[in-house]
Image: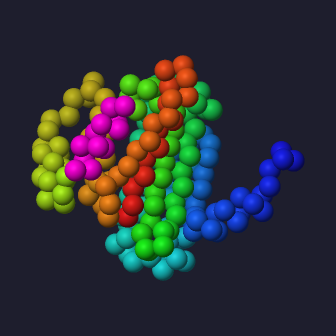
Amino acid sequence: MNGIDLLSIREQFNKNHILLCFNGPITRSLIEEIGKALRNYLQADNAQPGAAMDVFGVYIELTQNIRHYANRMNYSEYDGSATVVVARDSSGHYNVMAGNLVELSDGEAVCRAIDELAVMDKAELKAAYKTQLRRPRDSEEISGAGLGLLDIARKSALPMTTRLVDVGGDRGFLSILAVV
């Protein structure tokens, strides 16, 4: 623990306008508490009410996806951990980033789904969202990369981006960035 330069980390956070950063096991109650803190940060940052709701919605969707995935995969507390960062860029947009360990094949599927969403315009995203809403839900089917990602894409000012880094053992670290 002595090797951590907290001042350097703080300076990096300030330089990158990071409002919130979390790394560790994520539970439902923790998602809620961090969500409350995020709302307070956005309010202190004078975010427009619509933008604040969109940032909050994207944060909730990404963190709940991570929690549900880790539970479904029976990952340990360590392997099921999340890394979440919310920052404001120089143009006034909020960057909501979330990452977690995934099976490589699952990460590749999410990357493909987000790549497909990235080429859609707002009208196409709205139509795809409505189509997905009308689809019957199969309780046995894994629902990742569906309605939630469409909702995030609709709230985003720019196309979402992903990065999947192979960490060995058929697993990867999947990062998703949404700019709101």
* Magenta stretch bounds: 108-119
Seen from the viewer's position, the closer of residues 25 and 5 is: 5
In the image, residue 110 lies in the stretch drawn in magenta: yes
Q: Residue at x 87, y 47 (%)?
A: 2
Which residue lies most toward the right here?
Answer: 2
Asked if residue 111 can be seen in this view, the reply is yes
Decide if residue 64 is on the left or right side of residue 134.
Answer: right
Residue 179 in picture, x, y percent from top left: 39, 61
The image's colouring method is rainbow
In the displayed structure, would residue 7 be above or below residue 128?
Answer: below
Residue 164 in picture, x, y percent from top left: 45, 36
Q: Quadrant of the N terminus?
A: top right
Magenta residues, dominant SS class: helix
In the picture, residue 104 is in which quadrant? top left
Asked if residue 67 can be seen in this view, the reply is no
Residue 87 in picture, x, y percent from top left: 52, 64
In the picture, residue 16 is in which quadrant? bottom right
In the displayed structure, would residue 44 be above or below residue 140?
Answer: below
Seen from the viewer's position, the closer of residues 56 and 124 is: 124
Decide if residue 83 is on the left or right side of residue 54.
Answer: right
In the image, residue 115 lies in the stretch drawn in magenta: yes
Q: Residue at x 22, y 50 (%)?
A: 119
In the displayed structure, would residue 39 be above or below residue 82?
Answer: below
Q: Residue at x 19, y 60 (%)?
A: 122
Which residue lies most toward the bottom here?
Answer: 46
Give the mark count. 0
Residue 55 in picture, x, y percent from top left: 41, 63
Q: Quadrant of the C terminus?
A: bottom left
Q: Residue at x 42, y 69 (%)?
A: 93
